[in-house]
Image: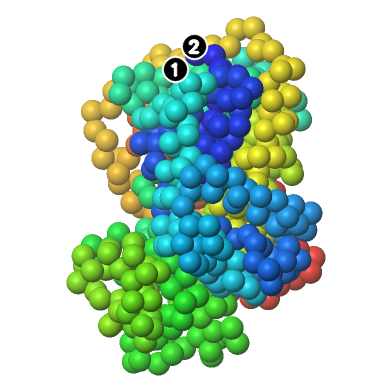
Amino acid sequence: MRTYDFLVIGSGVAGLSFALRAAEHGHVAVVTKKESAESNTNYAQGGIAAAVAEGDSTERHVADTLEAGAGLCDEEVVRLVAEEGPERVRELAEMGAAFTRTDGEGSAYHLGREGGHSADRIVHAADATGYEVECALLSKTRANESIDLLEYHFAVDLITEHHLGQHVSRVRPDVHCFGAYVLNEKTEAVEAFRARATLLAAGGSGQVYQHTTNPPVATGDGVAMAYRAKARVANMEFVQFHPTSLFHPEGDSFLVSEAVRGEGGKLFNQDGERFMPGYDERAELAPRDVVARAIDDQLKKRGEDHVWLDISHEPAAHIREHFPTIREKLDGLGIDMTSEPIPVVPAAHYQCGGVQTDTEGRTSIGGLFACGEVACTGLHGANRLASNSLVEALVFARRALAPAVEYAGSHAFPEGLPEWDASGTARPDERVLISHNRAELQRVMSNYVGIVRSDLRLERAQRRTHLLHEETEDFYRRSTVSTGLCELRNLITVAYLIVKTARMRRESRGLHYTLSCPEPREEECRPTLV
């Protein structure tokens, strides 16, 4: 059994930012199930929303976020993120993140604009901001002797009183987290990691759908672990679909950044008709949920499988300068974005709900903190404003530090925390159930719980996911654990939570649109808690 002052689950911007600060107060373990850089952060193209320009203001950033959130944002949280964001950006730059400048080193930031923003406020590193931020944080983390960065370590379950035979029957206010059971993928052994304070920063759950911009690691592990430990989870029905992922057999749902539309890209159907002005006065710069539903409507009405995103009317040099990563990817597939349109389709992109926290990252379980995409802080409401995710992760990683340090210094471990118990399990002869059930789950979620929903579709999804749950749990009880099996369990849990909260919300609001209740209702304007 390993013992640490702080355990961080996840190696994206949220986890690494917290780990670097926590290392000043104790010994830190960062566990990540693949290589350290493999996270949603690494693939974030757009940038970091922060009111750093002279003509911009915190109040405008707050107003834009509240409007996008469709009445469900926590205004206190929105305001603190908008106020603290510029300072977090400055700290990243000091760590070595090379953000794009208007006229070389030392000049002002080049600021982009994305859908839903009323000003140019997206601090970015060309079109690979997440990669730049991840590299800067990883470099500092690897050089810190107080941090153990453990790759290929998969967090299986949080350790709580439940593992002592206590508090097993119902949700209670006095549940505490004492670390996690972690699968070492190289030795195939599950180890107990005791920690005085634990931070969940395990990212999102895009892999619950067939088409997603998320990397393969985004299987909802953090939300599922927290839910099994009886933490409070909120707003899981609000799944943001990015309107423009690449539609190509070799594109692997590659994200074509919102910034392309911000720099003048236009959307056309396959007859060459520009359609967004007919859906919203902001046209291509409308919030993502509006654009995604418009594209979905065009595809369903016309029976087509993609639309076109065209920025070829802009100067070729301008396109090459601002979108080097996207251009390189498209060039490799034979698409020249400087002279022809890009085939795009909506794909699951961001989990707006998650483990509910307060303004300092505390969850409903003592000693368990959460930040980043795994958390529901109240910032995003019913729809995330573009590029608000990285700034949220940075702000809450900073805010969670003080209470985590205080908790770690004032709580002791209980007697008798058990090692992992693998008795009665055996290595499975066949793993086809894992791959089969995962593919079936993704089809069910994409067909019935996607951009447009209905009572009938949600009922069908609930029945099918329940059967998948029963099959998988029976297999899990009999089998030694593996990453693939644990990911499947977690995806099924996330699917259940999305379906359950979607059925609870008897209205359409933000990212949740149902044909059965197509209008927003004032009495439904509240978080959905499970």
Judging depth in this view, the residue of 254 and 521 nearest the camera is 254
Give percent across and percent down for residue 270: 33, 87
Q: Which residue appears at 52% of the width and 42% of the height? A: 95
Q: What is the spatial separation of the Cα atoms under label 1 and label 2, in whole angstroms?
A: 6 Å
Mark 2 crowdedness (10 Å alpha carbons): few <14, some 14-19, many ≥20: few
Q: Which mark is residue 1?
A: 2
Judging depth in this view, the residue of 63 and 472 nearest the camera is 63
The answer to whether residue 246 shows anywhere in this view is: no
Q: Which residue is mark 1?
A: 191
Q: Which mark is residue 278?
A: none
Give percent across and percent down for residue 11: 47, 37
Give the amino acid at mark 1: Glu
Quick check: marks 1 and 2 in contact, CB under 8 Å? Answer: yes
Give percent across and percent down for residue 515: 58, 74
Q: Which picture quadrant has residue 69?
A: bottom right
- Label 2: which secondary element: loop
Q: Which picture quadrant has residue 67?
A: bottom right
- Label 1: which secondary element: strand
Between discs 1 and 2, the one toward the N terminus: 2
